Amino acid sequence: MKKFKAESKKLLDLVVNSIYTNREIFLRELISNASDAIDKRKFMSLTDASLDADFCIEIKTDESKRTITITDNGVGMTETELENNLGVIAASGTEAFKKERAKVDGKSDGELIGQFGVGFYSAFMVADNVTVISRKVGEKTAHKWESDGAAGFEVTECERDEAGTTVILHAKPDDEENYSQYLDIQFIKTLVKKYSDYIRYPIRAELPKRNGGDVEVSEMTVLNSMTPVWKKQKKELGERELEDFYLHTYHDYRDPIMHISARIEGAVEYTALLFVPSEPSYDYFTKDYKRGLSLYCNGVLIMDKCAELIPEYLGFVRGVVDTPDLNLNISRETLQHDRRLRAIATGLEKKILSEFAKLLKNDRDKYDKLFVSFAKALKFGAYDNYGENKDKLKDLLLYYSDKEKKHITFKEYVDALGEDKTAPILYACGETVDKISMLPQLELSRDNGRDVLYFTDVVDEFVARMLDGYDGHKFENIASSKKNENSDNSDEQNALLKRIGDKLKDKVSVCATDKLKSYPVCLAAKGEVSLEMERVMAAMGGAIKAERVLQVNLDHPVISSLDALSGEAFDDTVTVLYNEALLAEGYKTEPEFLPALNRLLAVNGGAHRDADAVKTAKATKTTSKSAKTAKPNAKDDGADEK
């Protein structure tokens, strides 16, 4: 028996016990090795037609013998190649790899990365003994390599009818891990579909099939589809095939809003097929959601959800990326964060945003649907990371227009301003479109023909602050309070405002406003923190408060009548007015609101009763007076006549 080298033994222990986190990966690795071997023979057949064959990979399981067998008719290996390829794990050596890595990206330390041939040793995660029988093309003799993955290996001469390689795994006995599941050919089928469905050569296995009654026979079946949808030419694909692929792959029952395909050649080569769902998944806005695209390397699944390929704000996009230009770690499970991966991610982000812009221009109804579904994600994308992506996203954002009664872009709002280059972009904040539409401040804007954008998401005002305007037009909250709004008031009006302010001095400051028409008061804020920001911060557990201002419409009859009130009547009226402003802004009323309202109702009711009493008394007096001068009754009149 030949011994593994000390370095190789340590690496083998690392492969089996540490590098691979998922035991089922072994099948993917062995199938990929078989595919590589066939690739080599197929290339050789270009110059030697005698080497051409019906290339395929076959898998068999034997539950009684506890074996899993993977066979290919690829290039095969000689005795020397068996020893060098399988007897020396990572034959290039760690130091050689580091030097090679330094040539590629200037780094010479860090994780072991690249495809070293260590994938074969993942077999020892599920097997206590592995046998490899191989015959090189052009050779007449075959050789057998055998090892238990511990002390070493043996290479002996054997028989094999044709060129190629057979790998036989003897499954470990079950313990805490269920190794017997890998002997179930149906389970093997699911693993092939999951990891190796797009290997370009047929992967075959004998699957049980019922024949007529209860007789069960076996039939050689191709387990993989071989040709990925994303590798097909556009002219070969129909919308229905793409949609069916999406529905089947992502277990959705609704067709996607759109699909995006890309085939990039150059410094970094990759193919991508992406989909935008019609609605967010049920867990999209939870911490449990994991974004990412399925990453393939030459048709082999490397990672089911590679988050590095898609920015967080586009995390709702689903799809696949297939590239040959990829550095993998030795387990093919963790990607090296290098320039190629970043280049792919950057290219995909640009492509997606470009397609969104085209959809916005060419199919507004469909884009509106997309935006409504994923508005929060795109808005947070514009705000997140100190507005890093704001310029990429600002023209894709939509907001409900008070004038148009539909969603519009910032550009459409600004274009409607015409020649006015200084007019602000007005906006109002609230929970829903319906609630915002009832804000008191909207009346004046409507009278002046000015449009107002509705900010219904918590992030909207933060986005506006981050953008700091659009095309030279600043954003302005219609619920903001300007300074010196009392400057044109009369002395009597300022005195009234002071009386109101004294009553509410612990709650708000008070000023006059020209923003109101039919409402007597409204609530606003001055300073950097708006009312909406206060609500957002409170929901997040923050204690930041807005500087509240009660804006008073001095022309309103209710306000004019305050001058004649004093004492409890004045205090109660101001309390009711302040709580009216709170309600209009979506805040809860204060405990003193209802008692004050009831007292006012009682006073008004009493006044009405007093007025009714006066009217009744006058009516009674008039009736009595009339009775004294009335004619005799009908009976007397009749007697006299008689």
Image: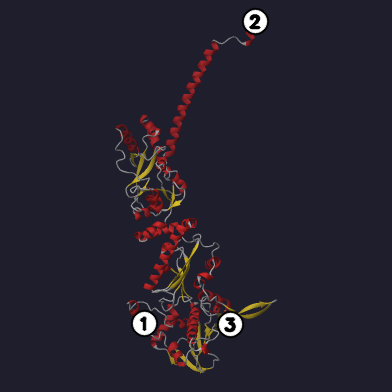
| Contact flag, marks 3 and 1 (Cβ < 8 Å) | no
Q: Residue at x 45, y 31 (%)?
A: 602
Between marks 1 and 2, how big is the CA–CA gap? 141 Å
Q: Nearer the viewer, residue 6 or 139?
A: 139
Q: Which residue is mark 2?
A: 641
Q: Residue furthest right?
A: 213
Within the image, what quadrant is residue 514 found in?
top left
| Number of residues whose C-alpha sits closer than 10 Å to that of mark 2, classed few (under 14), some (14–19) or many (20 or more) | few
Badge 1 element: helix
Sequence-wise first label, 3 or 1:
3
Q: Nearer the viewer, residue 394 or 210?
A: 394
Badge 2 element: helix
Q: Is residue 39 left or right of residue 448?
A: right
Within the image, what quadrant is residue 518 found in?
top left
Q: Is residue 391 visible?
A: yes
Between marks 3 and 1, how big is the CA–CA gap? 40 Å
Q: Is residue 507 visible?
A: no
- Horizontal and vertical percent position of residue 529: 34, 50
Query: What amino acid is found at the position of numbered circle 3 in the picture?
Result: Glu
| Contact flag, marks 1 and 2 (Cβ < 8 Å) | no
| Number of residues whose C-alpha sits closer than 10 Å to that of mark 3, classed few (under 14), some (14–19) or many (20 or more) | some
Q: Which residue is mark 1?
A: 97
Q: Residue at x 49, y 19 (%)?
A: 617
Q: Which residue is mark 3?
A: 63
Query: What amino acid is found at the position of numbered circle 1 in the picture?
Result: Phe
